[in-house]
Amino acid sequence: FSLIDAVMWRMLPVKDPAGLWVIDPGLTFQQYRTLRDSNTVANLAAYSTVRLNVSVDGSAEPTADGQLVSGNYFSLLGVNPAAGRSISVEDDRIPNGHPVAMISHGYWKRRFGQTPSVLGKAISISGVPFTIIGITPPEFFGVEVGMAPDVFVPVMMQPTAMPAFENLLDSPIIYRTWLTTVGRLRPGVQAPQAASALEALWRTELPEGSPKIPGAATQRLIMKPASSGLSSLRSQFSQPLFVLMAVVVVVLLIACANTANLLLARAAARRQEFAMRLALGAGRWRLTRQLLVESVVLAALGGVCGILLARWAIRLLVIYMSSGRSPIALDLNPNLRILGFTAAVSIATGILFGLAPATRATRVDLWPALKNLGSLPSRGRGLGPGKVLAVFQVALSLVLLIGAGLFARSLQKLNGENFGTSRESVLIVRVEPKGSDQRNIPGTTARLDRVYRELLERVEEVPGVRKASMSQATPTSPNPGAAGQVRLPSGQNVRIPLVMLYANYFATIGVPMAAGREFDAGDLAEHSPAVCIVNEAFARQMFPGENPIGKTCITTRRPSARDTAGPRYPTPPEPYQIVGVVKDSRYGHPRGEVQPVIYMTFLQTGTGRGQMVLHVRVAGDPNLVLRRIREEVLRVDPTLPAFEVHTLAQEMDAALIQERLIALLSSLFGGLSLLLASVGLYGLLAFGVAQRTGELGIRMALGAGRGEVVWMILREALLLVLAGVVLGVPVALAVARVAGSRISGLLFGLNATDPLTIVTAALSLILVAMFAAYLPARRASRVDPMAALRNE
């Protein structure tokens, strides 16, 4: 619940969060400036989340999460700095005029050891010194929940802080909507009124570029409440978190049933005490109240312990969710909602597991109880409250075990699917040279091509490196390339992703060739034909039953830039000859369908290089050559940042973080429920054996063997477990039917009624439960008949 609260509901730690709004869609700087300066309905501020190349005392981090913020960003939010001052309007008036920065409290602690002398110190951002003017408060992580920007700089410093990009402040490209705008309504203005006024101003900036944007004519500007911030975590983790919340509720019910059984046993042991109280005039309601108070106190103590354990456990959970590459920052401190929820659950569970034992305890037959005749021989048959609760525990435990089995098997299938690549021993390094996004500037493409080719040559010479290549995407990228119109020999035009890459790409990431060859240096020759490689899905769809090698397809996608100083650039629509077919691989997520893809080489196209991903296959442990690769990157260009350095295996694991999270937690809770059900069954049988000592003694005195006694107890346990299984399987199927759409979205390769999972879960439960039952059964077989009869 704490995690759901932090991700979904918690208010931002800003002044008057209920009055905060966000504008959708994003805006260009010109649009933001028009709305900010010309409107009379709202005060607006803007920010953009970016990656920054930051160096402190000459030591560079691989990357730093940053935000470009308008000068009134902190004042509009009402966030005061923990030290120093905030970025002001004066800092944000002149382009590239004020190289100042605020750092987060976490960054100050991590990189500067919380030294007070950090104010006034300079850090280098993309090779330019920025003066630290302030530190944000520790509870402030920005407007986007889950993100924790390290460095804040003025929006007007964008060209300096992000030299890889063009000057976005003056960019005429209307679709570069890079700013998120937040605001507060002026007094007396309602949100619909403000949205209409802002939309009228917004549309004045659209005509130039709107034809390039699909749906621009019908797009509306809307204002959304932002009191709880913005977050991609909500779409990514909301479904798993609510499913796990339901799992936790089931575990809580099992724990309540277990505790109720213990209280029933305790009440049976206090029969004489209760009989004495009733005989002395105490009313049944008074005794019931006393026992309920005891139950609620017990539940309250459990709630306090739960809060203490939850603070530790939830931090581990957030670390796991962060996947090691993109740390998630959440405010996990208990608030009134969490404390109130804990108190309500504690009281409710105290009443829930205490009411039945309390009511039963006060229904005492006074005369036998006062004479302590409660241990007279009993056959122990019939479904008393304890046995009903045991069946209930087994049934709920089976439901959780089935769910855990489904999620675990689904994850196993996803891991088996992978992406069609070899994940081991491959490093992923994102590189972003200066000007790499300025694709329309003459000479940029040729310069970047030289940088990337030199980098590949240097990296391939590093000891331990087997292959190296580059592309614009990784196997986990949801969009492997820009879609292009491809004209087939039949004259049909189809939209196909066009993936741009350098030579040796497939050998580097481990995707085998199904036929033909990979790109090589010969494709750079002046008069070599334009060639491409396709995947098997393309071959099946476009050339069914034929050999695609040697066939041609014509792409009508025009490269974004052509530079006569660079490699040979064919002019579309030139035919591209298919020279190779590669095995299918998935992009984005293993759940995704394999789509037809055309691969083209940068050796033959003038497409702007942009930011690239360096793929390196190494012999042995990738971490051993990582330092050398970083050194080679800096030798090519000392200002060249290497972002997100990790292994391909880590990237693929991160793509499955949602599935791993729910499989891990459902398995943990399923195991916990199995343990609780087994302990409950053990306790019930152990108490029954103790109560039936006299009966067991008589049976053994009359000739019953130890094996017969053991089987008698095990048979009783088996009947209870089978009753729970018979009840639990229909409940699990009903849950699958009711919540089918929600659960099915989390499964892969099987449905929620998978027979193998259900049978495996039921057999596992029966085996564990029978082991738990064997212990009291063995104890029963060791009863001394003479001692038992003397006690009677």
Image (cartoon, rainbow, N blue to C red):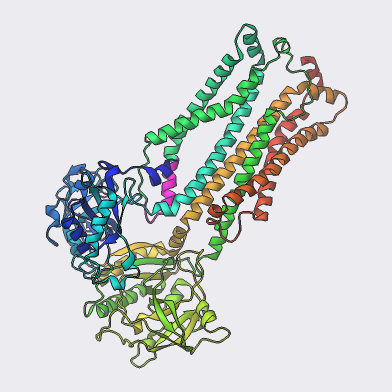
Tell me the residue at 23%/64% (across/down).
162
Can you see residue 59? no
Magenta part of the chain: 313-327
Of residues 393 and 705, which is closer to you in this image? 393
**Residue 107 percent coordinates (x, y):** 27, 49
Q: Is residue 169 left or right of residue 668?
A: left
**In front: 776, or 660?**
660
Front residue (pair 221, 282): 221
Residue 125 in which image quadrant: bottom left
Q: Is residue 9 above or below residue 159?
A: above
Image location of residue 228, percent across then percent down: 34, 46
- At 50% from the left edge and 55% from the top edge, which residue is drawn? 659
Can you say which quadrant of the picture contains the N terminus? Answer: top left
**Which residue does the image show at 33% across and 88% down from the upper left?**
571
Q: Relative to the observer, which residue lies in front, 494 or 211? A: 211
In this rendering, would 691 be left or right of 135? right
Q: Is residue 475 magenta?
A: no
Q: Is residue 479 visible?
A: yes
